[in-house]
Image (cartoon, coloured by chain):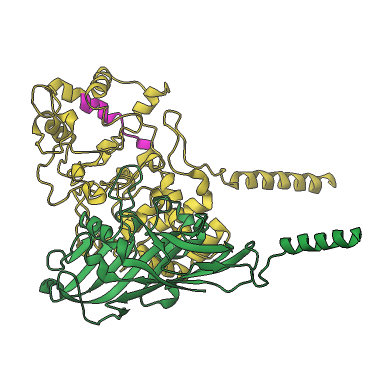
């Protein structure tokens, strides 16, 4: 009888220990560095990823406070299940229902990008948010006012303190928190990735495999490597009049850049339509038809789209298009599109 | 006798080693320098709202005149260059903020300085530097507010705005020239960075340990941007914002700057 209380106490202690262990949060894992990717371009050491930094960045990403009238957040145009592009919208509507000129790009694998925006106007991930915040058709807010709003907010000073050790909110810490969250958005678990890394789930059908071969012959000069882009600026002949949007020329001011836009990644392409810088094509079939027979000539048309016989575009037969489409679908990374760490 | 002669020779030798002039201080150690950017037009200090005439014959008034000065180098008579430590060398000179136009440098090696060199704008390395290194007048949200293009990442090196009857009525007779573009990072762009080289008209700036702080008094004439080598007409071009015309303006501003005099 005397032994029972001791035994009970011991069991209770054991149960408490077990219960406590179950409640331990999983250790924080920063952005994945896929083995089939090159080294990231972003300076990871200048902005180390932490759980608190990512949580803060995510909260900011989904917060309307960044806009003048507190109605528009980053997530208004960058939606998680569309690889952070804007599904069904050729161009997006921002504050006061004003439309921009260009299709909202996907936010994925940003750590590997050498430039941002369709014209490469921003070279560093840390600076991209400034463009959306200040744009009169997006958030129309001054960054200085954003900082003031954050300082007066009931939660942000404490969240900044948790992430940076000080509740003194600065331009740098604000932008770096957003970068920490966006840096987490790594997509490298598509069926193609499993195939290329020889992992389970990497079986390609015959059509998909044939499509990969056609892709490598006919598409991979521009949509190159594991990022599926050479990150260059090219005129792919979707227009011959660039007076409405001169593309890269608007940044470089060089005449040879008129009509050139940044080659986008094709990862998650099934989720990021409509396609091209102004969202002209709403299906991938239309994109392939464009390359096969719809290319428009202009002085800066990419030389790769001029064939030796004088024809424009990339010759593609109907079966080739079918196989290419099959292959492009293997670039969809369902795990990324549904990752609850990133969704609202 | 030998001791006397020896002593005399020693004393004589000693007098040769001691500097003859009592008030000639040895040129070692460090001192301070000031450089003032004094905006002037038509022979008098620049006044916003006052009428001026440009070389194209157009009447105008200024309402804004700001420019970044960076990468300052002080050059001695003998050609020795003192490069001001980079992070102490970024200034945003705003016409209506006199303190912002007075650049102060300390720990300047003693010597006689006859030339000044600086960049108008923010050099390319700083233009692509990490956000954490952009503080003060380089902070895109605060100190550089109004002087930063978020859509084409980079600083606006010079902002000149005003009104003129020659400017379009639809724009309220407003003209504005915003000059930026540092040459680009992963892909080349236009480069409007200019280095200005100036020589003192007469006296060198004398920097001595424990001595007075010499003051380079520069005159900066905004009207000079409207000519030499290319005449600029407000009627033809009332605005520039990071576009090819900004190159014409930047090429014109070399003779906007001169060292009017040095106070020692």
Find residue A15 and report its horizontal and vertical position in percent. Answer: 68, 45
In this picture, is B123 found above or below B219?
A: above
In this picture, is B236 found above or below A297?
A: below
Q: Is residue A73 in view from this perspective?
A: no
User: Is residue A329 found inside the magenta-colored segment of the image?
Assistant: yes
Closer to the camera in the image, A234 or A168: A234
In this picture, is B256 found above or below A307?
A: below
Residue at 15%, 32% (x, y): give it: A285
**Chain letter for the green part:** B
A311 displayed left or right of B117: left
Find residue A161 and report its horizontal and vertical position in percent. Answer: 55, 61
Residue at 24%, 24% (x, y): give it: A215
B254 displayed left or right of B57: right
Find residue A259 and report its horizontal and vertical position in percent. Answer: 17, 43
Magenta residues, start to end: A324-335
Q: Colour of chain A?
A: yellow
Q: Magenta region's main secondary structure? A: helix
Q: Quadrant of residue A40?
A: top left
Closer to the camera in the image, B150 or B158: B158
Closer to the camera in the image, A220 or A78: A220
Closer to the camera in the image, A47 or A199: A47
Residue at 10%, 38% (x, y): give it: A298
User: Is residue B210 found inside the magenta-colored segment of the image?
Assistant: no
């Amino acid at each position: 009888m005397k032994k029972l209380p001791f035994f009970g106490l011991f069991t209770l202690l054991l149960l408490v220990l077990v219960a406590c262990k179950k409640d331990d949060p999983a250790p924080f894992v920063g952005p994945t560095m896929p083995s089939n990717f090159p080294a990231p371009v972003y300076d990871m050491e200048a902005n180390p990823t932490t759980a608190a930094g990512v949580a803060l960045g995510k909260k900011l990403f989904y917060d309307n406070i960044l806009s003048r009238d507190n109605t528009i957040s980053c997530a208004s145009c960058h939606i998680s299940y569309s690889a952070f592009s804007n599904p069904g919208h050729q161009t997006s509507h921002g504050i006061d229902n004003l439309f921009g000129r260009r299709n909202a790009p996907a936010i994925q694998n940003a750590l590997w990008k050498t430039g941002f925006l369709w014209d490469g106007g921003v070279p560093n991930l840390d600076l991209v948010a400034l463009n959306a915040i200040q744009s009169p058709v997006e958030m129309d807010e001054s960054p200085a006012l954003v900082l003031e709003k954050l300082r007066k907010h009931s939660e942000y000073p404490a969240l900044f303190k948790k992430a940076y050790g000080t509740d003194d909110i600065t331009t740098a810490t604000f932008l770096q928190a957003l970068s920490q969250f966006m840096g987490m958005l790594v997509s490298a678990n598509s069926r193609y990735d499993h195939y290329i890394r020889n992992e389970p789930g990497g079986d390609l059908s015959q059509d998909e495999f044939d499509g990969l071969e056609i892709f490598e012959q006919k598409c991979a000069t521009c949509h190159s490597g594991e990022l599926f882009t050479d990150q260059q600026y090219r005129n792919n002949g979707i227009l011959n009049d660039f007076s409405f949007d001169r593309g890269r020329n608007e940044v470089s001011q060089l005449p040879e850049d008129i009509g050139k836009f940044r080659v986008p990644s094709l990862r998650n392409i099934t989720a990021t339509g409509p396609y091209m810088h102004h969202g002209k094509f709403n299906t991938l079939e239309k994109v392939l038809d464009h390359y096969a027979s719809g290319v428009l000539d202009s002085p800066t048309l990419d030389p790769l789209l001029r064939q030796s016989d004088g024809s424009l575009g990339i010759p593609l037969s109907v079966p080739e298009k079918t196989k290419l489409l099959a292959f492009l679908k293997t670039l969809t990374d369902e795990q990324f599109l549904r990752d609850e760490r990133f969704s609202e | 006798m030998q001791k006397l002669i020896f002593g005399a020779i020693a004393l004589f030798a000693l007098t040769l080693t001691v500097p003859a002039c009592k008030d000639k201080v040895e040129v070692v150690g460090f001192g301070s320098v000031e450089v003032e950017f004094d905006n002037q037009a038509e022979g008098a200090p620049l006044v916003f709202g006052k009428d001026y005439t440009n070389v194209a014959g157009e009447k105008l008034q200024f309402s804004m005149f700001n420019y970044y000065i960076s990468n300052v180098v002080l050059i001695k008579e003998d050609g020795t260059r003192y490069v001001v430590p980079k992070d102490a060398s970024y200034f945003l000179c705003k016409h209506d903020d006199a303190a912002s136009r007075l650049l102060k440098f300390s720990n300047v090696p003693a010597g006689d300085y006859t030339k000044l060199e600086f960049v108008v704008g923010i050099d390319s390395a700083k233009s692509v530097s990490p956000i954490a290194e952009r503080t003060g007048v380089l902070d895109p949200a605060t100190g550089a507010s109004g002087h930063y293009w978020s859509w084409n990442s980079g600083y606006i090196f010079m902002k000149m705005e005003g009104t003129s009857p020659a400017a379009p009525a639809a724009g309220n007779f407003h003209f504005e020239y915003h000059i930026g573009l540092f040459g680009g990072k992963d892909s080349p762009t236009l480069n409007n960075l200019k280095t200005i080289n100036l020589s003192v008209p007469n006296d060198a700036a004398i920097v001595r340990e424990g001595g007075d702080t010499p003051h380079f008094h520069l005159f900066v004439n905004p009207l000079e941007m409207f000519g030499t080598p290319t005449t600029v007409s407000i009627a033809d071009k009332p605005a520039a914002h990071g576009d090819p015309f900004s190159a014409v303006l930047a090429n014109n501003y070399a003779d906007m700057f001169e060292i009017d005099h040095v106070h020692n």
